[in-house]
């Protein structure tokens, strides 16, 4: 087929089916353009994007400032590797460490790589600073976690589909129930070999589980009291998604631009990815203070592409957009409207049972079993009605639009969602 011919949806799907590994199960929608909160399919049909590439596109599709940063830097210098210095990396490192309030950053590319980096950093700190005997370090994780797809990360997943037949698994992890301070305390105090606690401030993939408002603060206090590193995976929740710059900012009602929010919990290690580039480029980062980050010496960790000049330029542009367009405040405001409107509908409905979330990371629980295909069918119908969303687990649908949405657009989307849910009313 010549590149000038327009590809039909069926042709595009058939190509992926035949030549691509079947490691995803996409909705049958073939997209070829995006702008702001919208994407278009190959037939020109326009949709609201309510997934935002799993919260990577917080700044909206093809944001001109981010696209310009890529183009300009790509024309100048794209990759040097870390064998040499380049004139963008240091500028970016100063920018991002000031932005999030840490001494140092270690730049990587994908979320899973950043999680791996944080785990390695935590283990090395445990042996060289905490004094744990070599190979004895344990890191606590949470049931229902999602931290990526590498061999080590799936070793401590309890999603059978993600784990089964990928063993043998990496040792050194203990899983505790999420949002359960007592369970965490018991394990932290059970051994001198606990090095860190890895946690998602909200469990996104698991179905947008928001913990009790004091969970993170109590967990952090336990970590501090026991010399255990508190490691926050904000790959999905970070960068304004939940109505504050980071979800560890807690849920106080103050303005998102304030520096010290009442329930702010400072992680010892912060993991970022996804929206760090506004979805334009794979950029991830691990942030920590010197006492931790300085355990990594030359040759002990790295990545050919990590911290490349394009990534540095893109991340600075993407974070600049978050600040200048006040995306955290907007996410906070629109998220409240979304949940209020859905709550009012759910009170009258028997197809949806619950809406939960924070800022613009929300989920609606569908009144059917986890094994049912009702949530999938609702998402197919939502697409026909001009809105793209995807079930997370079985009967849970995540709703996470780009944060550049206006209130008018959000209200239109709530209309589409409610009208579609009504079609499935029992
Ligand atoms: C998406 C995600 C990751 C993995 O990021 P990739 O870029 O897909 O490797 C890790 N942690 C959380 C919480 C995520 O949502």
Image: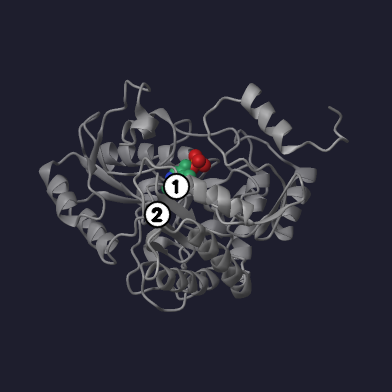
Q: Nearer the viewer, residue 33 or 377?
A: 377
Q: Examine the image and state in which quarter residue 3 appears.
A: top right
Q: Is residue 275 left or right of residue 243?
A: right
Q: Is residue 137 left or right of residue 103?
A: left
Q: How many marks?
A: 2
Contact, mark 1 vs mark 2 (Cβ under 8 Å): yes
Furthest-bottom residue in view? Answer: 254
Residue 7 sits above or below residue 336 on the image: above
Ligand 1 closer than 8 Å to the CB at disc 2? no
Furthest-front residue in view? Answer: 426
Helix, strand or loop under label 1 = helix
Q: Position of residue 24 (x, y in %)?
A: 53, 34
Residue 138 sits above or below residue 231 on the image: above
Write the residue at 20% across / 32% down. 133
Q: Nearer the viewer, residue 347 or 123?
A: 347
- The residue that disc 2 covers is 366
Q: Nearer the viewer, residue 46 or 292?
A: 46
Helix, strand or loop under label 2 = strand
Please state, as top left, top right, bottom left or bottom right, where the N terminus lies in the image.
top right
Q: Position of residue 417 (x, y in %)?
A: 53, 62
Please state, as top left, top right, bottom left or bottom right, where the C terminus lies in the image.
bottom left
Residue 154 sits above or below residue 51 on the image: above
Q: Earlier in the sequence, mark 1 or mark 2?
A: 2
Q: Is residue 396 left or right of residue 313?
A: left
Q: Does any portion of residue 225 appear in the rendered image?
A: yes
Q: Position of residue 300 (x, y in %)?
A: 44, 32
Write the residue at 41% across / 37% down. 116
Label 1 crowd bin: few (<14), some (14–19), many (20+), radius 10 Å: many
Q: Position of residue 398 (x, y in %)?
A: 47, 54
Write the residue at 68% across / 46% down. 310
- The residue that disc 1 covers is 374
């Amino acid at each position: 087929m010549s590149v000038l011919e327009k590809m039909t949806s069926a042709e595009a799907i058939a190509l992926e089916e035949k030549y691509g590994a079947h490691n995803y199960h996409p909705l049958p929608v073939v997209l070829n353009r995006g702008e702001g909160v919208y994407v278009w399919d190959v037939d020109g049909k326009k949709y609201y994007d309510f997934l935002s590439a799993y919260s990577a596109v917080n700044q909206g599709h093809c944001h001109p400032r981010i696209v310009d940063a890529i183009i300009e830097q790509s024309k100048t210098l794209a990759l040097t590797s870390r064998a040499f210095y380049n004139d963008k990396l240091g500028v970016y490192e100063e920018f991002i460490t000031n932005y999030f309030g840490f001494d140092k950053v270690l730049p990587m590319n994908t979320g899973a790589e950043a999680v791996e980096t944080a785990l390695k950093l935590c283990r090395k700190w445990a042996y060289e600073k905490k004094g744990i005997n070599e190979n004895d370090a344990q890191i606590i994780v949470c049931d229902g976690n999602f931290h990526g797809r590498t061999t080590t990360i799936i070793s401590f997943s309890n999603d059978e589909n993600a784990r089964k037949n990928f063993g043998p698994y990496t040792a050194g992890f203990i899983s505790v129930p999420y949002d359960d301070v007592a369970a965490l305390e018991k394990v932290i105090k059970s051994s001198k070999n606990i090095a860190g606690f890895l946690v998602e401030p909200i469990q996104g993939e698991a179905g947008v589980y928001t913990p009790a408002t004091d969970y993170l603060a109590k967990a952090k206090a336990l970590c501090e009291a026991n010399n255990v590193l508190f490691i926050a995976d904000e790959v999905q929740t970070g960068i304004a998604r939940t109505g504050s710059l980071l979800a560890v900012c807690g849920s106080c009602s103050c303005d998102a631009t304030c520096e010290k929010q009442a329930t702010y919990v400072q992680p010892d290690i912060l993991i970022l990815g996804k929206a760090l580039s506004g979805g334009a480029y794979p950029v991830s980062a691990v942030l920590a203070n010197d006492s931790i980050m300085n355990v990594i010496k030359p040759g002990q960790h790295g990545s050919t592409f990590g911290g490349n000049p394009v990534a540095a330029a893109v991340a600075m542009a993407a974070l600049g957009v978050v600040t200048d367009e006040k995306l955290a405040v907007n996410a906070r405001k629109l998220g409240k409207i979304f949940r209020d409107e859905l709550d009012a509908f759910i009170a009258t409905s028997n197809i949806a049972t619950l809406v939960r979330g924070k800022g613009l990371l929300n989920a609606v629980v569908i009144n059917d079993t986890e094994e049912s295909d009702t949530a999938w069918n609702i998402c197919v119908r939502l697409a026909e009605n001009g809105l793209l969303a995807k079930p997370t687990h079985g009967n849970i649908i995540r709703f996470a639009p780009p944060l550049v949405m206006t209130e008018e657009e959000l209200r239109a989307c709530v209309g589409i969602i409610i009208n579609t849910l009504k079609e499935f009313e029992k």
